[in-house]
Image: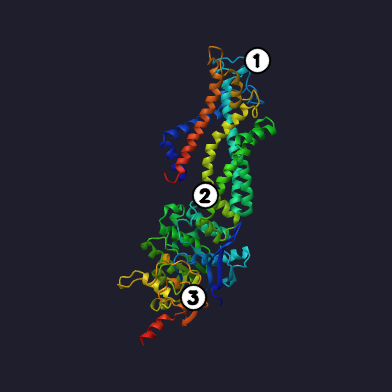
């Protein structure tokens, strides 16, 4: 059985052709490899601008990969023809970050939910469609009476429910959720997360869940990959990652999560604004890292398995083990 | 929902209500023209009735409510049927200019790259020449006729729509719901027709409402210069052209023939004013800072 999503050595560089002079290039994803296992939720965590959303765009075919392989449902997304990709869309659907801008303001709920069905020519019989829409709305906690309403009449949480219903209309197997709760306020976040968890279970979805919030990731994800400046720096099963973070960046992110149980500890990394990108470092995080050594400037950047199913890309590593060794 | 809001704003704002009243009044005049001024030449209702061939205009009387102009053309008939012609010209020209602008601007923004570059440079070429001068040149080349004048006016009016539509399509194209439709599997035509255009044309519709008055004013200029309606046509510009020799009155009586200018001039003035007030109201309503 192939994994729902498999990404190997993906590079993505944005290029702007200049009329005169050099082309402008910005590498956004560098050698990213990821696997979303069947029936799992893979969390992709990282600060803003690290390439999480670009990864989703490449996976969804909105952007073309510069190099590397992206397999969705076993198919190479970069090589699919338009009609093959359209078929793939029924298997893989997406929920976007901002429920205010991802719904067309001139369409009512009925039109919004019918659109995916119309595009793919499904449930054409009016009676069947009516029943289907009713069931769909029920599944996301909305009611049939709201079909004639327009997006601006709903709250953020309800809009996100509409977005989820729209994604589910095609009965996909893979759901890409690009920060689906970060635009919502905290009380509503919890409702949407519960809904996603419940839907994931009832529909046996495999989900790629992008977020910058560890608390959210912890609630929902089975596996977590941490990204920094276009690279995966650490990936591990969720509980492993939280209890035993291996990469200094993960540690820094975790220490930045506010907690009522912990006191006195300070985030263990320099603020991002103070450290400009330094290409001379082989490790992208070294400029901010408090464990950085001269060795971090050299040698290839590699993601190595340091514990069973737990990969990390730190050279001074595994620093936890180093620490315990020095203690011994 | 938006329409309700616009109507409410118009009703509550006195100047915009005034604009609406003027436009509605003119619309009724145009609609009821055959009743208000019975046609005398069924083959061409825009042909002004001529009582005699006497040169000097006659002041308003029971027979000629607004008086007569040079060669005894009835001014009342001219103003009433001129209203219908003004609507015909204004709406037709604006409609086609809007349509061309929509196609050119929409294609430029949607396809981007070279298509965009070529279409927008073409637009710039038309923009670079003062519109009245360009319209005169085109009208003169095609020959004096109302249809040719409308072609000339359309040819100079479309670039502003092309630019406006292009800008709006470019911005709507970036919105998340367009990407969302694409990830649902929607193809180009569906995205363009269902999502982009309905959300992008609204500002252009407002400009079109402002433009109707301006087009009629330009049409009157062309007719005045002899590049549009022929003498004897119920056209406001043409009526003013016929008043040209009488504007200064007679020695000692500078306003002796005031009615020859006031009747058609007042009609043009009120018509343009009405559309401008209405267009201003639309613009204010759509300004997000006021909403």
Residue at point 52% right, 28% down? B269
Mark 2 packing: few (<14 Cα in 10 Å), some, or many (20+)? some
Q: Residue at label 3?
A: A297
Between circles 1 and 3, the one closer to the viewer is 3
Q: Nearer the viewer, residue B257 or A135?
A: B257
Across and down, in percent, residue B154 comes to 62, 38
A324 vs B160: above or below? below
Does residue A146 appear anywhere in the picture?
yes
Residue at point 48% right, 67% down? A277
Asked which secondary structure carries label 3, the reply is helix
Mark 3 packing: few (<14 Cα in 10 Å), some, or many (20+)? some
- The residue furthest top is B252
Q: Chain of mark 3?
A: A
Instruction: Find residue B62 and report its image quarter.
Output: top right
Left or right, B167 with reference to B140? left
Q: Chain of mark 2?
A: B
Q: Residue at label 2?
A: B199
| Residue at mark 2 to residue at mark 1: CA–CA distance | 57 Å
Across and down, in percent, residue A118 comes to 56, 58
Q: Nearer the viewer, residue A287 or A127?
A: A287
| Residue at mark 2 to residue at mark 3: CA–CA distance | 51 Å
Q: Chain of mark 1?
A: B
Q: Are marks 2 and 3 on the same chain?
A: no
- The residue furthest bottom is A328
| Residue at mark 1 to residue at mark 3: CA–CA distance | 101 Å
Residue at point 49% right, 80% down? A304
């Amino acid at each position: 059985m192939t994994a729902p999503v498999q990404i190997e050595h993906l590079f993505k560089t944005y290029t702007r052709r200049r009329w005169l002079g050099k082309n402008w290039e910005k590498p956004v994803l560098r050698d990213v490899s990821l696997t979303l296992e069947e029936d799992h939720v893979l969390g992709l965590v990282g600060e803003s601008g690290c390439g999480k959303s670009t990864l989703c765009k490449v996976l969804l075919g909105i952007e073309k990969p510069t190099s590397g392989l992206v397999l969705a449902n076993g198919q190479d997304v970069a090589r699919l023809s338009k009609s093959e990709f359209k078929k793939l869309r029924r298997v893989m659907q997406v929920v976007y970050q901002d429920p205010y801008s991802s719904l067309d303001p001139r369409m009512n709920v009925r039109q919004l939910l019918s659109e995916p069905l119309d595009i793919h020519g499904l449930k054409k019989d009016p009676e069947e469609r009516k029943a289907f829409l009713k069931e769909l709305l029920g599944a996301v906690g909305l009611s049939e009476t709201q079909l004639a309403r327009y997006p601006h009449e709903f709250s953020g949480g309800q809009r996100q429910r509409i977005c989820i219903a729209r994604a589910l209309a095609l009965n996909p197997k893979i759901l890409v959720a690009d920060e689906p709760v970060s635009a919502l306020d905290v009380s509503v976040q919890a409702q949407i997360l519960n809904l996603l968890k419940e839907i994931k279970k009832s529909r046996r979805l495999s989900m790629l869940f992008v977020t910058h919030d560890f608390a959210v990731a912890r609630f929902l994800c089975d596996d977590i990959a941490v990204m920094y400046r276009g690279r995966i720096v650490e990936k591990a099963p969720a509980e492993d990652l939280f209890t035993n973070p291996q990469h200094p960046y993960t540690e820094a992110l975790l220490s930045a999560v506010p907690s009522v149980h912990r006191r006195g500890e300070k985030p263990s990394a320099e603020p991002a604004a103070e450290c400009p990108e330094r290409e001379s470092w082989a490790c992208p995080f070294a400029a901010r890292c408090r464990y950085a050594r001269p060795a971090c400037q050299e040698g290839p950047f590699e993601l190595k398995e340091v514990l069973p199913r737990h990969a990390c890309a730190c050279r001074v590593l595994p620093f936890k083990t180093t620490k315990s060794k020095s203690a011994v | 929902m938006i329409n309700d809001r616009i109507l409410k704003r118009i009703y509550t704002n006195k100047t915009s209500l005034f604009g609406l009243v003027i436009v509605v009044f003119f619309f009724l005049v145009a609609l009821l023209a055959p009743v208000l001024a019975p046609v005398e030449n069924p083959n061409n209702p825009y042909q002004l009735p001529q009582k005699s061939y006497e040169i000097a205009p006659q002041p308003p009387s029971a027979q000629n409510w607004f008086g007569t102009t040079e060669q005894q053309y009835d001014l009342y008939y001219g103003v009433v049927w001129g209203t219908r012609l003004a609507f015909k010209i204004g709406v037709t020209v604006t409609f086609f200019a809007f349509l061309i602008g929509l196609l050119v601007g929409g294609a430029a923004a949607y396809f981007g790259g070279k298509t965009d570059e070529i279409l927008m440079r073409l637009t710039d070429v038309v923009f670079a020449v003062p519109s009245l001068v360009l319209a005169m040149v085109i009208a003169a080349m095609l020959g004096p006729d109302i249809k040719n004048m409308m072609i000339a006016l359309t040819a100079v009016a479309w670039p502003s729509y092309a630019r406006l539509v292009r800008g709006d399509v470019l911005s709507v194209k970036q919105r998340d719901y367009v990407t969302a439709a694409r990830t649902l599997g929607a193809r180009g035509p569906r995205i363009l027709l269902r999502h982009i255009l309905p959300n992008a044309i609204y500002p252009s519709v407002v400009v079109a409402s402002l433009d109707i008055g301006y087009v009629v004013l330009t049409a009157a200029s062309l007719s005045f210069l002899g590049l549009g309606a022929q003498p004897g046509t119920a056209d406001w510009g043409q009526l003013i052209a016929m008043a040209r020799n009488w504007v200064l009155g007679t020695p000692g009586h500078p306003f002796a023939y005031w009615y020859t200018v006031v009747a058609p001039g007042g009609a043009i003035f009120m018509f343009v004013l009405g559309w401008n007030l209405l267009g201003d109201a639309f613009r204010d309503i759509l300004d997000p800072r006021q909403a």
